[in-house]
Image (cartoon, rainbow, N blue to C red):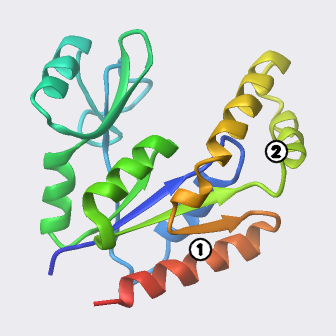
Amino acid sequence: MAGKLIIFSAPSGSGKSTIINHLMQQQGLNLSFSISATSRPPRGTERDGVEYFFLTPEEFRRRIANGDFLEYEEVYKDRFYGTLKSQVEKQLAEGDNVVFDVDVKGGCRIKDLYGPRALSMFIQPPSIDALRQRLEGRGTDSPEVINDRLARAAYELTFAPKFDTVVVNDDLEKAKSEALAKLKAFLEKP
């Protein structure tokens, strides 16, 4: 039986990765992470076809022109990220339920393409102030980077109504449980 698609989007610092990691550890859901393509070089021990499909900027552009991507974005000059149709279709054909961690535009695009076969879930922080506290609490970004992320978050929050469901992460354990319940309900539908 062909698999389904589960799309997650959220502003940076919303807890999306933590929630996705929790869901990926659950037994019996047959979840498989979508492997994205990128034009950046591998970091550390990253391997092609495992963490990412590593393409040159030229190859990425050629594949865009060929219509090979479900979604893509040029984040910085010559620094592309995207989702290859062929990889997703292969995972779905194998019966995997494919999990996506994508930006809001990519999430909307994948949902538009797959319709009811996809569940789009937006992970929302309780407020911009709470998000600021989380980002500052990480201690990994400069004040300028945090301000840029907060400005982007305000923009991304305008996309929440376009998603099938919104999980407000004001309590991480509650948000994990809510996301799991919504995911299970979606996967049980014929």
Q: Which of marks 1 and 2 is nearer the N terminus?
A: 2
Secondary element at image label 2:
helix
The picture quadrant where one finds residue 71 is top left
Question: Disc 1 marks which residue?
Answer: 179
Q: Which residue is drawn at 82% across and 58% down?
A: 126
Q: Which mark is residue 104?
A: none
Question: Disc 2 marks which residue?
Answer: 131
Q: Which residue is drawn at 61% across and 49% down?
A: 10
When the figure is inspected, residue 122 is found, relative to residue 10, above or below; the finding is below
When the figure is inspected, residue 100 is found, relative to residue 81, above or below; the finding is below
The x and y percentages for residue 117 are 29, 72
User: Of all residues shown, which one is farthest toward the left?
Assistant: 66
The x and y percentages for residue 116 are 32, 73
Q: Which residue is drawn at 36% across and 58% down?
A: 111
When the figure is inspected, residue 111 is found, relative to residue 80, above or below; the finding is below
Nearer to the camera, 158 or 186: 158
Nearer to the camera, 186 or 171: 186
The picture quadrant where one finds residue 148 is top right
Tag 2: residue type?
A: Leu
Nearer to the camera, 162 or 30: 162
The x and y percentages for residue 154 are 72, 39
**Left of 98 or right of it: where is 123?**
right
